[in-house]
Amino acid sequence: MENLSDFTQGSIPRKLIRFMLPILAAQILQTLYGAVDLLVVGHFGSTAGVSAISTGASLMDTVTFLIFGLTTGVTIVVSQYLGSRDTERIGETIGGAVAFFLIFSLALTVLFELLAPQLARLMQAPAEAFDKTVAYIRICGGGMLFIVSYNAISAIFRGFGNSTLPLLFVAVACVVNVLGDLLLVAVLRMDVAGAAIATVAAQALSVVFALLVVRRRKLPFPLTRRHIRFNRQVRLFLKMGAPIAIQNFLTSFSFLALCSFINRLGLTASSGYGVANKVNSFLMLIPSTLLNSLAAFVGQNVGAQREDRARNTLLWGIAVGVAIGIPVSYLAAFHGDLFARIFVRDAAVIAQARAYLRGFSIEPVVTSILFCLMGYFNGHGRTRFVMIQGLVQSFAVRIPVSYFMSIRPDANLTMIGIAAPLSTIVGIVICLVFYVYCRRKIRVGEQPLNAQDAR
């Protein structure tokens, strides 16, 4: 019987799509998990609450992207060791990850608890929503241990080619968060604080469930207490993951800057952008799924020295992303108000969200292409290049363009929204140039950077 977790042989499109589907479902649930706070507060809370969640969630998302980048390093290393059948080093990698991410999560918790007011002020949270923003940041910051743990556990299973268990973990979180929001916000009228408490509780229960599942499963690698320490594999997965984390963080920081620019336009614009951002989370599900899938899929083939399959995986990923991205972009351009109405009833806020989505609309198509290229390079361990191109597109295009559009006398969210796809197109050009350069440089006997290089 064909091993569906072995990506080094068999049909690429069939295995890629089978691997993608649970990741996509998990992404959908993760997005619902994040969106339900805004949805419930939008219907049962206040406009100031919508703005507070928009600003606070943007900040928390930035940190989550940082965490995801670091844990992606674990995915890459595990998948490459799996491709080369090196189970002892898999145990070392996972033990090192446990030690590192425990310390990292505690440091983040202290940071958010101490600096929540300063962070809200840095984000230029509207005065009417400032206190609510601080409360949201502090409560969610208290759950950093659970955010980090969930991402680390999911990254390990993706490295093994198992995308089903991460889906189950996020499903638990989604259900708990929905029930918690309905109880604390809709019934008890706790507004932003209730939404934040529900979020942390959902994360905690999801991690408990994940640990119970891990404990009951027979692990296909050795893992003892002696593995749980800062070892040489920590340096390796950080070498792989740190550039991704830096790129994710600074890219998300550019969107934080965008949020700050828009916050200066007033409470309605701030709330409209927050709603549009939640809609964008759904529009970008396919690109995000492709990025996560290709890193593990390509990583296994790099470990097995199957560069031909790695390249074909890239082409299949782009084909899938563009085919789905075109109709999604059409909906964003011409029917953005329909999506916005799901979250709020305020006509002015809906109009602002629709305006931003119109400028943003081609992003699902172009980002699918960019994320496939990034996933391909990540799977090869070329994460430093991925970081560099991300910094160029964010700080040379997205921030300057969005700032320029926001200070114009006739500033509107449509023109500000255009900054995102413009920066993505620049990233595609940079990636294609690097791809051609690498293809010309690689000769028989030369191998891309992978986990074995660091032994």
Image (tube, rainbow, N blue to C red):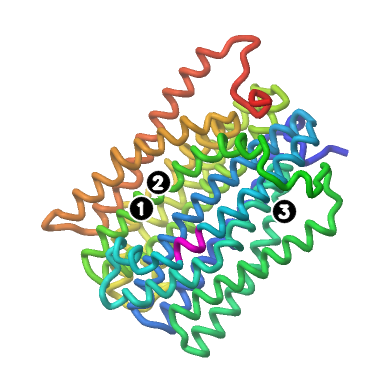
Quickly name the residue at label 2: 251
Q: In this view, which residue lies farthest toward the right?
A: 1
Q: Is 224 covered by the magenta stretch?
A: no
28, 75: nearer the viewer = 75
Horizontal arrangement in the rendering, residue 440 relative to residue 410 (left or right): right
Q: In this view, which residue lies farthest toward the top?
A: 444
Give the residue at x 34% y 77%: 131
Above or below for 238 versus 114: above
Residue 322 makes an appearance in the image: no
Q: Helix or strand or loop: what does disc 1 sit on?
A: helix
Please give the range of residues in magenta.
108-112
Q: Please say if the residues under marks 3 and 2 sit with CB atoms less than 8 Å apart.
A: no
Placement of the N terminus among the 4 image quadrants: top right
Q: Which mark is residue 255?
A: 1
Q: Which mark is residue 164?
A: 3
Give the residue at x 46% y 52%: 328
410, 61: nearer the viewer = 61
Give the residue at x 49% y 44%: 245
Q: Amino acid at mark 1?
A: Phe
